[in-house]
């Protein structure tokens, strides 16, 4: 790689960083942000009680639940605790301040930005070509749903980012089992598992590949002696870091970890999801729930390349026989297959609780893209070996053009639908998305709806009824005077705001067409947002004379 190329790549990353710093303030507040922040608050009270018991008895601290009795005590807080402390550093005292959520969105993006850098390095390490590494980074960035959620999804996107970082160090460790690589892998894995306990996959896969490398070595005993010190370093630091970063484990590391893992496998979420036109309980989603969601929300070219990548990888594995791989590159391919299909099969076989699309499985997206890039690399290599030199340039230019067109289409979708890229669907989803799948399940669009209301209604008190809780929490993105003007009620409201969740294209008042029925019962639709011809939010102004409707 030339110096000029390095400068261009660094410039590209800096441009992406600048774009993120420009856009992070455009998004609303999602379902998870308030409760995730409060998990950090509860943990900080626990930490204070250990180092300064007197402070923990203050009235402010007494109002905060104890970690031992808090319902979400089993959540990792390695991301949340620093953010709560950052509030103090920045002097943010009001937890309803827009500044608090802007800060959270900024750091959410910065974590993902680091994840993109490590993904670039992961691709470069595997394929040894800067252009393919840049393409991989663009695949990750220009995934519309991932792009939007990188600013506010403090669980799944942060977990995806740390999972990518840990995967990079895992690959380095398998290539060279040194104490240094073991240390960084242990640290990254512990951070990942502290975001979501599914990070336990990382040490399991690490030890599985170490065992296989010993079994398939020419001299297994000598290989075992060679690997043992690095493996012990990894295991020791991984356990230490996992406990250190997760205060919930401190008093009973093994017991609390097992309890947290058990809770994760049968998560406490018992609502319904709209899937293929029917409401299905999250505890009873069919086995194809995740594959279908991946298929309808990922750019089509990435899906096609993924299929080719799987084929190329399996062909190489078949040629390697029972050993599965014969080179570090082939081992990486087997690793990416394991990191994608392993968790996918696990949630299917365990009949795990799944909801809100496939966001809980975003962490396998890095492996998915690595397999897709293997498909692209395989096509390129196939052309070089099978196509005559006279036609090779045409083949390569055509392949590059297809990739650029796909990236361009994803970029257009991101720009056109900003800041609502989180409801991106590809053509495979069909033309009746509003009747078949969840739309803005995050409730992000409530921000724009409330901004419209306070801008166009100048009264000192505006009564609003929201379909779900995010319709209320998104007022925190408004100025303090506008927050004080809004009054959220269940009856006698001036406006009804809905993101149409839990209502098969309808509203909570009954199973009738949404817009027509709401206009008939309440009043005119005064504001809406549409993405690709389906609405994701609606504001309906109530008829003041219609007392029956106002008192629903």
Image (cartoon, rainbow, N blue to C red):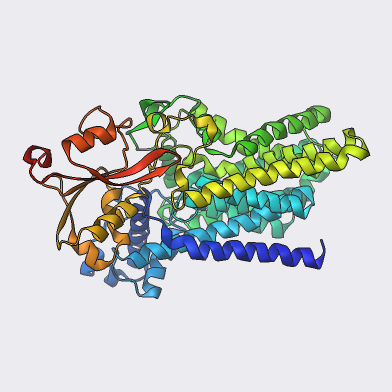
Camera sees residue 4: yes
Q: Quadrant of residue 329?
A: top right
Q: Residue at x 70, y 55 (%)?
A: 121
Q: Quadrant of residue 380?
A: top right
Q: Residue at x 22, y 42 (%)?
A: 524
In the image: residue 139, left or right of residue 419 = right
Name the spot of residue 492 as percent of width and height, x first: 10, 46
Q: Residue at x 42, y 46 (%)?
A: 256
- Vertical side of 139 occupied by 431: above or below: above
**As rendered, which of 127 and 303 lies closer to the eye?**
303
Q: Residue at x 75, y 44 (%)?
A: 400
Image quadrant for the C terminus? top left
- Vertical side of 226 occupied by 398: above or below: above
Q: Residue furthest right?
A: 389
- Vertical side of 371 occupied by 456: above or below: below
Q: Quadrant of residue 319?
A: top right
Name the spot of residue 204 as percent of width and height, x first: 61, 41
Name the spot of residue 533 as percent of width and height, x first: 42, 38
In the image: residue 194, left or right of residue 121 = left
**As rendered, which of 114 and 545 lies closer to the eye?**
545
Name the spot of residue 349 as percent of width and height, x first: 51, 26
- Vertical side of 498 occupied by 480: above or below: below
**As rendered, which of 114 and 52 lies closer to the eye?**
114
In the image: residue 311, left or right of residue 72 = right
Camera sees residue 177: no
Image quadrant for the N terminus? bottom right
């Amino acid at each position: 790689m030339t110096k000029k190329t390095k400068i261009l790549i660094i410039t590209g990353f800096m441009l992406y960083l600048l774009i993120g710093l420009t856009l992070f303030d455009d998004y609303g507040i999602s379902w998870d942000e308030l409760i995730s922040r409060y998990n950090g608050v509860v943990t900080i009270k626990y930490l204070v009680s250990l180092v300064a018991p007197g402070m923990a008895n203050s009235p402010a601290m007494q109002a905060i639940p104890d970690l031992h009795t808090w319902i979400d005590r089993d959540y990792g807080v390695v991301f949340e605790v620093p953010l709560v402390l950052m509030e103090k550093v920045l002097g943010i005292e009001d937890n309803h301040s827009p500044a608090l959520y802007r800060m959270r969105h900024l750091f959410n993006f910065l974590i993902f930005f680091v994840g993109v850098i490590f993904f670039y390095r992961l691709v470069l390490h595997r394929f040894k070509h800067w252009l393919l590494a840049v393409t991989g980074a663009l695949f990750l960035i220009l995934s519309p749903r991932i792009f939007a959620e990188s600013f506010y999804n403090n669980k799944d996107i942060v977990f995806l980012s740390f999972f990518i970082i840990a995967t990079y160090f895992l690959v380095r460790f398998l290539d060279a089992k040194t104490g240094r690589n073991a240390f960084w892998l242990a640290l990254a894995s512990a951070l990942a598992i502290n975001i979501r306990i599914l990070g336990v996959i990382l040490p399991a896969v690490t030890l599985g590949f170490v065992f296989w490398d010993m079994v398939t070595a020419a001299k297994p005993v000598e290989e075992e002696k060679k690997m043992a010190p690095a493996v012990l370093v990894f295991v020791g630091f991984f356990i230490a870091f996992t406990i250190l970063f997760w205060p919930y484990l401190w008093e009973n590391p093994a017991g609390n970890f097992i309890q947290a893992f058990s809770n994760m496998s049968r998560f406490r979420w018992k609502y319904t999801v709209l899937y293929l036109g029917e409401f299905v309980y999250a505890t009873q989603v069919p086995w194809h729930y995740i594959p279908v969601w991946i298929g309808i929300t990922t750019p089509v070219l990435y899906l096609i390349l993924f299929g080719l990548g799987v084929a190329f990888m399996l062909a190489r594995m078949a040629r390697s026989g029972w050993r599965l791989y014969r080179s570090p590159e082939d081992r990486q391919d087997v690793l990416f297959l394991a990191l994608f299909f392993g968790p996918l099969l696990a949630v299917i076989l365990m009949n795990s609780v799944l909801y809100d699309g496939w966001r809980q499985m975003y962490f396998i997206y890095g492996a998915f893209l690595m397999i897709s890039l293997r498909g692209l690399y395989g096509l390129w290599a196939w052309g070089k070996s099978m196509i005559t030199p006279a036609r090779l340039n045409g083949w390569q230019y055509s392949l590059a053009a297809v990739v650029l067109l796909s990236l361009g289409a994803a970029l257009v979708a991101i720009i056109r639908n900003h800041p609502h890229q989180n409801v991106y669907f590809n053509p495979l989803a069909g033309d009746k998305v509003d009747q078949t799948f969840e739309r803005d399940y995050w409730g992000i669009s409530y921000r724009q709806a409330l901004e419209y209301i306070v801008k166009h209604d100048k009264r000192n008190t505006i009564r609003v009824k929201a379909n779900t809780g995010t319709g209320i929490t998104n007022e925190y993105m408004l100025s303090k005077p506008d927050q004080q003007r809004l009054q959220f009620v269940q009856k006698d409201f001036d406006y009804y705001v809905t993101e149409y969740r839990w209502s098969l294209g309808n509203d909570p008042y009954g199973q009738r067409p949404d817009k027509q029925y709401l206009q008939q019962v309440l009043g005119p639709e005064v504001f809406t947002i549409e993405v690709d011809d389906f609405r994701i939010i609606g504001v309906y102004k109530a008829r003041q004379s219609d007392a029956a409707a106002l008192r629903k």
